[in-house]
Image (spheres, rainbow, N blue to C red):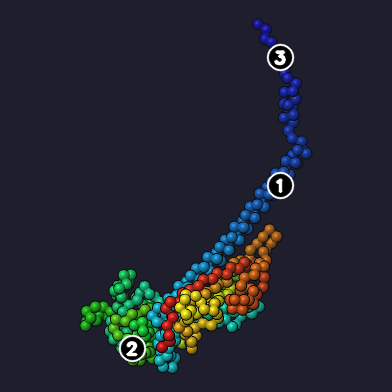
Amino acid sequence: MRRHQRSADPLVLARKRRSARGLTLVELLLSAALGILMLGAAVVVLLAAGRMRRNQQLLSDANEEARTALRQVSQALAAAGAGGPVYSFTGPDGSRQQRPAMLFTNGAAALHDGDMPQMPDTLTLVRYGADRRTVLVRALADDKVSVAPDGRLPTTPGVQPDIFHPGESALITNFQRAMLVPIERRNLVMDGDLARNVVQLETPGAVNPVQLQDPLVPIQPGATVFPVRVVRVRVMYVDAVGKTPARADLVMETLNPRTLGPVQPPERTVLARDIEDFQVQWGYDRNDDGVADDGFTDQGPTEALMDPGLTFARLSISARTSNALVTNDGEFVAKEDTPFERGIDLGGAPRPEASGHRRRVLSTVVLLKNVAAPRI
């Protein structure tokens, strides 16, 4: 049987010939150009997203570090004076002297002339190890203090010398009178009369706890003994090292409780890096209505003055990013107008030079419930 054969469709044959021919040079160049444009646009978007993520991370880090430092200083300030607003101590000349539980120095000198003209404030505090408080178990002696853990404190560890850490002093208080005694050595001994282990805190030869007492209100066994450090919170300038630029850190350093000079070797904790300014202002509530009478002022507690109306402290930290922020056009130049840069309200600091570092100013108000008492 003869098969019927049909001729191919001319349109189909034409399409097959064009597909076999491929792309022309013009079509190829247009496709390549479009692909390069799309790839370039994707790269620009990715780079912009990377810069945005980096900038946000720098801002977040600066904000979080400053917030953490502000919380630590606030807690230490709120606890200052827990054992009494004023304490007795042995001065450098061996005499009995008194000092407020907190001291304030209003900033008067530039942190670093030229690039850091701010004038940060300084706080000197008694910092408590309240979770390790003990009780006085024997009458004060000329050269030692005998203590044992406070049974009223459920978290107090067992009797051991390390209940007082190296470098700590003992603040002994009956909450009417308080004294601060440096510790030279700590020994765990068995007290036969008390039938228990006690920690004997030996004092330096120039410090006599008995002579630090107020004869009208003596310290008796049963008084509370806090492990404490006298610390100073300040902004410290750090020189540039290699490619690392100069900066300023907010630090808490341990002081000699008798001289208020830094201990040797230095004991210093960095609370936050890249801190430009630290300011403290004080509020007085003398009519006891829960509000600062005349707002906040730079007049704070000093060696010679501890106003019983002192009720509030406003802490403010100016933090900046650790590196300059960048934009599509290069380094971002900050044109901010924070209270620190305006030079008002927070210490009168002059305006820093414009830079690519963004700044954040964080503030908090602390209730000073432990220092509102007259000086002895």
In which quadrant will I find the N terminus? top right
Between residue 186 and residue 174, name the one nearer to us: 174
Residue 356 to residue 170: above or below? above
What residue type is disc 3 on?
Answer: Arg
Residue 37's tag is 1
Q: Is residue 269 visible?
A: no
Location of mark 2 (residue): 217
Asked if residue 148 lies left or right of residue 274, the reply is: left
Residue depth check, mark 1 versus mark 2: number of the one nearer the observer: 2
Determine the residue located farthest toward the top in the rendered image. 1
**Residue drawn at 48 percent across, 70 percent down:** 71
Q: Which of marks 1 and 2 is nearer the N terminus?
A: 1
Callout 1: 10 Å neighbours few (<14), some, many (20+)?
Answer: few
3 vs 2, front mark: 2
Q: Quadrant of residue 100?
A: bottom left
Q: Mark 3 points at which residue?
A: 6
Neighbour class for label 2 at 10 Å: few (<14), some, many (≥20)?
A: few
Amino acid type at mark 1: Leu
Residue that lies at the very extreme toward the right in this rendered image: 26
**What is the three-letter code of the residue carrying label 2?**
Val
Q: Where 293 sits versus 8, above or below?
A: below
